[in-house]
Amino acid sequence: MGRLFWKFFILIWLAQLVSVLGISGAIWLKDRDAARHAEVIESGPRAGMALDAAEIALRYGGSDALRDLLQQQRREQMFALDADGRDLLGRPVDAALLASLRQTSGRDDRGGVRQLHGKDGSSWLVYLKRHEPPPGMRPGGPLLGDFRGPRPPGPGGPGPGPGPRFHYMPVLYAMLASLLAALLLARHFARPIRNLRTAFDAAASGNLEARIGPAMGRRRDELNDLGRDFDRMAAQLQASMNSQKRLLHDVSHELRSPLARLQVAIGLARQRPERVDASLDRIERESARMNALIGGLLTLSRLESGAGVEREEVSLNELAEVIAEDARFEAQSAGKDIRLEEAGQAMVRSGAELLHSALENVVRNAMHYTAPGTAVRIRVERDAAAGQACVTVCDHGPGVPEAELETIFRPFVQSSASSKSAEGFGLGLAIAERIVKAHGGAIRAANAAEGGLCITICLPLSAAAPA
């Protein structure tokens, strides 16, 4: 058991113990007062008849008739108290007894105390004192084993005895029950925290597969939420680590081929000096490929690190026109074309160079895969209702299997339908996706009904965009 368990256990048990003792003490004090009252006041049928007689006398004869009745009933020891607590015959009355009598009279006039009103407007609190039997006949007295001893009489009636004894067994049972409840509650709170600590220790030692969710069971509280957050954090860390490992493996694989060709070209240049120009051309091409790969990796790393983007007002229409013009110049030599469609002016706040790079990567990817004799279609549209501007680029190539539509945006991932003829590294769409997300947008891919692949980029409209 950890320290937190004992803290929970002791605090909860002490709180319950104080509550049990407080409630038990209050009940005992109430029972003691009631017992003392019962020892002084007669509440049987005899008291009822005497109080009825007092009520009739006061109603028809007033205070004088009540005084006469009290004098006649001296043996019965009937008392009548005015508003100030003075007895009609001048006999002394205990102050504590007076307060108890008033409370009893206010709750129930059917007991041994009654509030009576006379025809002369007077009001009297009337009660009949309990008779004290001889010591030998008293319940619990000497003949019956009175372990409490005799109770001496007091003013206004016999003095109260020791009252009810404090019952320790119910309190003991309550303490044991509170002890068990505190134990269960402390275990309920401390166990998931121990599980969390174990999971954190496992994650700190490198085991990112540790999960706390199953150990939480069917809890529905903040500790369960904390465990679920830990599982989500561990899953994200694991995915990030796996992504880094995969990226390192892919980079090593992609660099190996151009480096090998560089070594071959250098060897040929040394062996055949007469063909050094061809070897230098090969070295230049492979260097350019490695430079493009490293540049793409640096861009990808900068985007994934969350580097800030300097934003400005950019017209997607003008950006698409520039990219379409450049791509058309290259596509015509391969028997391909670029068509641009515009539906409204679309203004966004973004980094112009980054957004140009993202859209150019998508257009070049489409231009590479579209079939000769076909055109890549670029459509720019403004959706004021959704508050966004979208650019859709469609080709007439082989398309992408449905299961791979989400994976083509990962680094070094190329579609199985086109990877054999691909010349790039599989970084273009990954970079485009990171740029779009850095601008608060979304990018998605879908196969066109007539064949080919369509990639759509949507960005939030600028606040300064025309309505």
Image (cartoon, helix red, strand yellow):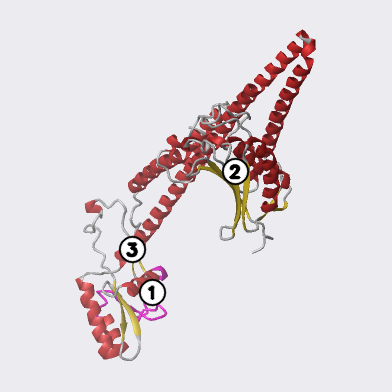
Question: Which one is earlier in the sequence, the residue at label 3 or at label 2?
Answer: 3
- Is 185 inside the magenta-drawn segment? no
User: Would you say 413 lies left or right of 171 here?
Assistant: right
Image marks 3 and 2: residues in contact by CB distance under 8 Å: no
* Label 1 element class: loop
Residue 202: which quarter of the image?
top right
Image marks 3 and 1: residues in contact by CB distance under 8 Å: no
- Is 82 inside the magenta-drawn segment? yes
Majority secondary structure in the magenta region? loop
In front of the other: label 2 or label 1?
2
Residue 35 in view, yes or no: yes
Query: Which residue is painted at 60% across and 26% down in the image?
Result: 245
Q: Which residue is mark 2?
A: 376
Closest to the observer, 23 or 28 = 23
Query: Which residue is painted at 43% across and 35% down in the image?
Result: 214
Q: Which residue is mark 1?
A: 92
How many angstroms separate mark 3 from mark 1 (CA)? 21 Å
Locate residue 377, reporting x and y percent.
59, 46
Amino acid type at image mark 2: Val
Q: Which residue is mark 3?
A: 34
Locate residue 422, reporting x and y percent.
59, 29
